[in-house]
Each structure stands twice: as C-alpha cells, then as structure tokens.
Amino acid sequence: MRITATVRALALTIGTMVLAGAGNAQSGGDSPPVWRADAYDGGGEGIGLLEAVRETLARDPNLLLQEQDTKSQEGRVLEAAGDFDWFLSGQLSWEHRLQALRESVIEGQEDVRNQVTDAQVESCQEEQRLTLKLQELIAAQTTMGIDISTDIGFDAQITLLEAAILTADNAVLQRELENTRNNLLTTEISLTQDDLAAANQVCQESGATLARLGEVPKDEDFEIGRANIRLEKLNRSGVLFAPYLNAAYDSTQYVGKHNGFITPALDPFGQPLISPSGIPLDRLISFGGKDIDDIYTFDLGFEVTLPLGRGRGRVATAGFEKAASIDLDASKLILEHGASESVLNTLFAYWNLVAAAEQVAVLEDSVSLQGGLRGTTEALIDASELPGAELARSRAGEANAQAQLEGAYRDLATARLDLVEAMGYTVNDLGALPVATEAFPEGPNPEEIASLGEALIEAAMQRRLDLAASRSLTESGLVLAEAATTALRPRIDLTLGAWYIARGEKTASDAIDATASDPSWRVAFALDKPLGNRTARGRLAQSEALVHQRQISEEDLARRIRIAVGRALASLQDAMDQQAKAAESVAAYQQVVEVELEKLKLGETTLIDSILTEQQQTSARLALISARFRVATLIAQLRFESGTLVDHVNGASGVNLENLTTLPEDGRL
C-alpha cells in the first residue's frame, strides 16, 4: 500500500515550519533612543519638592543607565531562551564530475563494437551467399544440371536425384524422382528465403547499431544533487526533536552518449517474438550510453533524542534560562531601588537648597542689624556718648557679617546647581536656576519615633528592594550550581528515529509514488564520560563559590540595613532634640538682641556686647537651620533605609509628598 499522501503532508508541514522560522528570523527590536541632557530653564522661579522628585525619576541618567542594564538582562533571557527555538539547517549542493574511463571499461566498449562489427560482416556475407544460392535454386527449378555452388551438400543431393532421373527405366519412377527433386528445391528455396531475411535483418541492424554506438567513449561524467532540510527543537526537559527531509539525485553517463530504450523484439517479417513460455520478448536499442536510469531518493522522517544522563531535566537543560530570568527580576528590583536612591539624592539636594536659602536670609538680617549698629554707633560718637574708636569695631562687625553673607550666596548658587544635577538637567543660564518653594518639615514627635522601633526594621527587611534583589541573585546562583551538579553525569543519549524512503528512477514523481508503505526505524545509544571530569567539577566549584559569595552579600546587606535603620532612628531622635533646643535658643536671643539694642541707644551697654549678642543670635538661627536640615534629611534617610520612600506599582515608581516629609505610620509598614 502506498502512502504518497502522507509523505506529501509531512513535507508540507516541514515547509510551513521553515517559512514560519524564516519569518521569525526577520523580526528585530528597534534601537534605543540616545539620551541627551536638557538645560534647566525654570526662569529662576520656584520649584516644589514633589516636582523636583518627579523630574528626577523621569530624567536621572543613573536610572536611565540602570534601565538599559535591565534591557540588557532581558536580552540575556531572550538569548538563553533561544536555545529552545526551532533551528533550521539546510544544505543544497550540485556536483558535476568528469573523469577518464578505466582501460578495462574502454576495452569492454571496444569488444562490444568489435562483436557488432563481426556480426555485421558475417551476416552481410551470409546475405550475399544466400542471395546467390536462392538464384541458383530458382534456376534449378526449371533446368536440370544447374550447379548449386553455394551449398555443396545440397548440390550433391540434387545431382544424385538428377542422375537417378536420367537412368530411370520407367516413366512412373521417373515422375516420382522428379517430384522429389521439385519438393526438395521448393523446401530449400523457402528455407533459404527465411535465412536470407534473417541475415538481411542482422546485417542491417548491425550497421544501425554501429552507427548508434558511435566511437568508443573515453570519459564519463556524474551529476549528483543533494538537498537536506532539518528542523531541531530542544525542549526544556532535554528532549531533542528533529524532523528532516533529504532529497538526492544521481545521474551518470558516458560523455557524448545517452541511454537507449526498450522496444518489442520482431522477427525478420515484423512479427513479435514470443518466448517458449508465451511472454513477448523485448530488445534494447542502445546509443552507446550506460543505460543506467537517473535515481531520485527522498527520505522524510524524524529523530527524538532522550538524554538519560547529562542534560536530563529542566534544571540541566533550562538552568541558564531560569537563572537569567531570575537575574532579570533582580535587575528590575535594582532599577526600582535605584529610583529610591535617586529620590534620596534629590531630597538631600533640595533640603540643602532650602537650608542655603534660609542661611542667606539669616545672614542678610545679620548684615542689616550690623548696619543698624554701625548707624547707632556713629550717632553716639557724634553725641560724644562713645569714643571714635568704637566706629572701627562696628565696621569690623558689619564687614564680618557681609563676608558671611557672600559665602552664603556662593553656597546658595552651589546648592541650586546641585539640585539641577540631581534632577538630571544641565545648565546654560545661571539665572534660570531653581528656587525651593517648600519649607522644612516640622518633624515627628518623640512618641512617634519611639513607636516605630523594631517594626520599622522588620518592614525594611520586607520592603528593601536591593535586599530582595540580593535574594534573587542568590536564588539564581543556586540554580546555576544545581545545573553544574547535573553536568557531572556521563552523557547517555537514547535516539529513536523513523523515516519513510521514496526511491525511484527517471522522474521525481516516480520516486514519490514508490514510497515504502512501512517506515524504517532505528534505535541508537551514545555514551561519553570524561575520566577526570575536571571541567565539570571546576564549573561546579565556581558555581558553589558564587552562591556563597551571594549568600554572604545578602546576609551582610541585611545586617547593614538593620543597623542603618536603627542608627537613623536614634539620630532622628537626637536631631529632634537639637531642633527643639535650637528653636528655644533663637527665641531667647531674639529678645536679648532687642534689649541690647535699646540699652546701646541709652548708653547702658557696650558696643562689643551688642555685636556679640547679634552674632550669637545669628549663630543660633543658623544652628536651627542646620538642625531642621538634619531632621528633614534623616526623615528621608529613614524612609529610604526602610524601603518606604518610593512606591512601586506594576514596575512604575511613584512618590507623594507624605512619603517625602513624614515617617510611615504603623499601619503602612
């Protein structure tokens, strides 16, 4: 039973898969856009804290770089998954080979032609002899005494009969002898005619055969075509599936010759020749070729390779893909943690800008007060209430305040540049630098700080994304180590194959129609085992060391996070105390300064006391700014260390003002 339809269906399936694979090969990703820093152009206007943070999340090059790292890791995952794509391989070849014939073959071809030539000469000579004999026999039918020179034996028989006829003693005997002679001649004429026809046929066909055979060939050529298509699919279980289609074409011929053909064999009178068993006979009409038909061969089948040792199972086969996928998750976590780091840097820069602006305001007040002291001093000197030498002291105090103010201006400019840098901008116009519009947060009360404690530390263990990333890296290392362990096995592969063979001559269609009804099959085992196996053992040692390194890093990071949260809580409590004391000091000095100025005008205090009092008030106000700056940054630091600074939802990072300026409540840990 033929299964041509099945073979063609399988071939169509492979062709479809080939086209699908070729289509997938054309797809590719777009190149990423090039990042360029834009110049900040706020027109010197104010910027809120939330706006500054959001600008940072959108523009910080460090985040953009980490985002590209994540995309690179996505590429590694794609690369690792590529091991399980369909893989198409194919070969197409055509070979034409020309070579000289062996001497034995040439001699054989010469023998064939010599035999045909001998048959021609013999048959043609026989034809001439039989023609003359036929003429002599026909003449002998009417005339006695004709010499049959071409057949001595038959001539002797006729001669004896003629002698007997001439010596017969009665008419009856004479007539009987004459009839015998005539019958013998008639029979011999018929036989001679048949032999003459046969000789004529052989003579003519031998000549035609020699003409068709032509000269003896000296060279032969070969044409060999091969087409192989193979698809391979490695499953994550380690099983390899590979359907394939092989096609072959083989042709050979003597140079300048071509194959003959088969035709029915005919007798000299054009009648078909029949064998004794009743089967019509055929004969080859040769043209000097090899008379070997072209051969077309098609193999359509598949192989399945089952790893029984090395490469068995998902960990052994897909371990690198799984590890790369885990590393991708870790990279995304690191990207989100990087958003928290960038926000923290911006918060520090923003609060530093707020502090710098407030310091400028304080020092401007100081310069104004020192200027007022100088004016009061000049009036008192004019009224002879103070000696003229006090004017130099007053001017020195004013100059000192002015110098501090100039330094504060420089610090303010630097702080504005630092904020621009933290947000990911560059600068073209120094006049367009941002101005902070937010004030320092008031800070939590001591009871709120005390209520956090261990809960905030535990929340940090759960929410810190860099710690989660470290755990993921440890997990991926364990996967690689397990895969390296499986590589210690020897390779024992079982391969099962089945295929249909289509083989035919003359045309490819004949070969396909001649497909075997049952498939061929084979079973094979492959084994290899490195005796030392040092390569696999070395990779396992490296993988285990990597796991240990990542475990140590994970534990160390968790340790440092706990310490950082505890330190930030303690520092925040201390900073709140300092802020409260600084605020009390500023309030007290405000009253003292006003009193000192009145007393100076009344001549009840010295100029130096007034100057020192004003400077102490300025120092107290600057100390309050420093304390409030510390409180604001410690709130941000505590939020960062506990993982509650930035919210991450579906891969997007978001912030709100509450997260930036207050501590988390117990219910949101």
Image (spheres, rainbow, N blue to C red):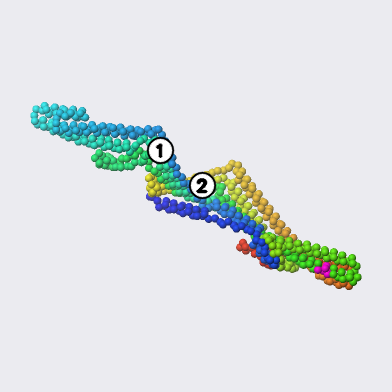
* Number of the label disc, if any, that sits on residue 246: none
User: Range of the magenta residues?
Assistant: 368-373
Q: Is residue 371 magenta?
A: yes
Say few, some or many: other residues with alpha carbon within 10 Å of mark 2 (under 14 / 14 to 19 / 20 or more): some
Q: Residue 284, image x and y in percent?
A: 32, 40
Quarter of the view holding residue 384:
bottom right
SS state under label 1: strand
Task: Quickly name the residue at label 2.
Answer: 494
Q: Is residue 9 left or right of residue 394?
A: left
Disc 2 marks a residue whose amino acid type is: Leu
State which quadrant residue 406 falls in. Answer: bottom right
Do we see residue 426 in this rendering? Answer: yes
Q: Is residue 258 left or right of residue 156?
A: right
Identified at 71% across, 61% down, the residue is 417
Q: Which residue is mark 1?
A: 220
Q: Quadrant of the C terminus?
A: bottom right
Residue 419 in the image, given as x and y percentages of width and height: 70, 62
